[in-house]
Amino acid sequence: MKANVRFFGREIISESVKGCERLAILGKYPDTSLERFAFSQFGPMHLVAAKLPRVIRADFFVALPMRQLIARMYASERRRAPHFDVRGSRPVDFGVMYPPSSGKIAIAYSGGKDSIWNLWRAEKKYGPANTLAAHIHGLNRANSSRY
């Protein structure tokens, strides 16, 4: 199975024979190149998680670290890593594009056991003032109790 993933800045759409899914930023959210890039990288992972297509064809660049993270997600489901078809893309040097801030960290936070553990570890290592917990409301509606 193939999934065609298209990126429109504040919206990502995944289409396959199993249907169409859409992930969009509707509320207040910074609209900078960094935020659009982060959304373009993590959005596809969320959209392909339920179907685990064999081929992911994207009309935008999917960075090697994100491809590796998606491959690990597939491995956790005992599936082979997907083939990425990202024609016309070129590698990005993250160190030059977005140099890390020394001693600071941002973590994804859902409120579940895993994210509470990650928050505790981050605050222990970097300190509460240097730790940012980021939560995106409504990202995983399948496991949510209400909206």
Image: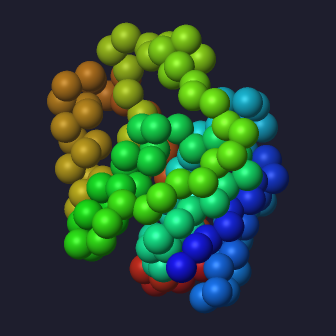
- Residue 98 shows in this picture: no
Colour treatment of the image: rainbow
Q: Is residue 76 placed above or below 99 in the rendered structure?
A: below
Q: Of 122 and 97, which appears nearest the observer?
A: 97
Q: Position of residue 51 (x, y in %)?
A: 48, 79
Q: Quarter of the image holding residue 30?
A: top right
Image location of residue 113, percent across then percent down: 23, 62
Left or right of residue 61: residue 126: left
Choose between 11 and 107: the one closer to the eye: 11
Residue at the extreme right of the image, as rendered: 8
Is residue 52 visible from the viewing direction of this image?
yes
Q: Residue at x 66, y 55 (%)?
A: 58
Query: Which residue is pictured at 68% across the width and 62% down the height?
Result: 5
Quadrant where the C terminus is found in the figure = bottom right
* Residue 123 image offset from top left, x and y in percent: 25, 32
User: Up-down: is 74 above or below 91?
Assistant: below
Residue extending farthest to the bottom is 18
